[in-house]
């Protein structure tokens, strides 16, 4: 399927989604949201895709805080902002964000919907919505606090401060920072390493971590145990055992 607001391709079980430059962002936000939704729906039905890279290919992909044109009007006084994060957040396979340049506003919120974040040393991050008299609307108030903690999240949201890659790494906003020339190779290597693992185990591990955040410890442990026992009944688990015993690479089929 061909897209106009983004581009994507599959490389060895990894779907790479390339996002547009800042110059095209505001004019293509509605189209971008729709195409992201379409791509994620295709990924969900495609058994061979086992990891996703959401890639800031341009030097800057800075989604601003201006709501004009970003929503679909439902009534005279009601406007619903378009979400870039909803479809990505629903994916049950690993999603890796690759950032180069500015991930600000809704772009940062999209990054927060990914599972792992790799950034170049020259990247910057922030949710400056408060500067325009607004608040983050695409998951920023919820996902940021879950990732970096309530104290740091509320500081960033209330001040609208833009931080550099080093600070983002220090507070846990990004997993790794690398030289710009090494970013793509690092992300690709990580994505293919993850994609080589058992797809059912990857799905259950992600489910246990994300759903467990909203549970008590006892409930989370029960979820973990239930998923573990279900995993034992799969053919992939049997294949993993055989591959280990015969000292060969496992051939997982997601069954």
Image (cartoon, rainbow, N blue to C red):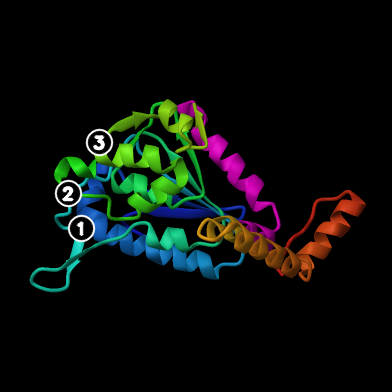
Quadrant in which the C terminus appears: bottom right
Q: Position of residue 101 (x, y in %)?
A: 35, 33
Residue at the far right: name it. 246
Above-or-below relation of 27 to 40: above
Asked if one can make out residue 216 in the rendered structure from this viewpoint, the answer is yes
Q: Is residue 43 magenta?
A: no
Q: Position of residue 252 (x, y in %)?
A: 74, 61
Question: Label 2 crowding class (10 Å Cα cut-off): few <14, some 14-19, many 20+?
Answer: few
What is the magenta range? Answer: 179-205
Question: Label 3 crowding class (10 Å Cα cut-off): few <14, some 14-19, many 20+?
Answer: some
Residue at 50%, 59% (x, y): give it: 214
C-alpha separation, residue under disc 2 versus residue under disc 1: 8 Å
C-alpha separation, residue under disc 2 versus residue under disc 3: 17 Å
- Sequence-first tag of 2 and 3: 2
Q: Secondary structure at mark 1?
A: loop
Q: Position of residue 204 (x, y in %)?
A: 64, 62
Residue at 38%, 57% (x, y): give it: 85
Q: Position of residue 218 (x, y in %)?
A: 63, 61
Quadrant in which the N terminus appears: bottom left
Query: What residue does disc 3 label?
Result: 159
Q: Is residue 201 magenta?
A: yes
Query: What residue does disc 2 label?
Result: 66
Marks 1 and 2: in contact by CB < 8 Å?
yes
Residue 70 is marked as: 1
Residue at the far bottom: name it. 75
Front: mark 2 or 3: 3
């Amino acid at each position: 399927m061909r897209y106009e607001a983004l581009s994507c391709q599959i490389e060895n079980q990894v779907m790479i989604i390339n996002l547009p430059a800042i110059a095209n962002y505001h004019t293509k936000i509605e189209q971008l949201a729709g195409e992201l939704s379409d791509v994620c729906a295709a990924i969900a039905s495609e058994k061979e895709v086992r990891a996703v890279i959401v890639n800031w290919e341009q030097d800057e992909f800075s989604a601003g805080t201006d709501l004009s044109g970003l929503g679909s009007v439902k009534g005279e006084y009601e406007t619903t902002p378009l979400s870039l994060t909803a479809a990505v957040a629903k994916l049950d396979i690993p999603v890796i964000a690759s950032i180069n340049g500015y991930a600000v506003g809704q772009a940062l919120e999209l990054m927060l919907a990914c599972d792992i974040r790799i950034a170049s040393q020259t990247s910057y991050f922030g949710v400056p919505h408060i500067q325009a008299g607004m608040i983050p609307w695409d998951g920023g108030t919820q996902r940021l606090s879950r990732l970096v903690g309530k104290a740091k999240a509320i500081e960033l949201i209330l001040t609208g401060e833009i931080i550099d890659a080093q600070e983002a790494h220090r507070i846990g906003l990004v997993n790794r920072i690398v030289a710009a020339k090494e970013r793509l190779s690092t992300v690709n290597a990580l994505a293919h390493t993850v994609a080589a693992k058992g797809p059912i185990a990857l799905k259950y591990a992600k489910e246990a971590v994300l759903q467990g955040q909203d549970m008590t410890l006892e409930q989370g442990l029960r979820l973990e145990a239930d998923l573990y026992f279900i995993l034992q009944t799969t053919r992939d688990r049997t294949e993993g055992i055989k591959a280990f015993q015969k000292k060969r690479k496992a051939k997982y089929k997601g069954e």
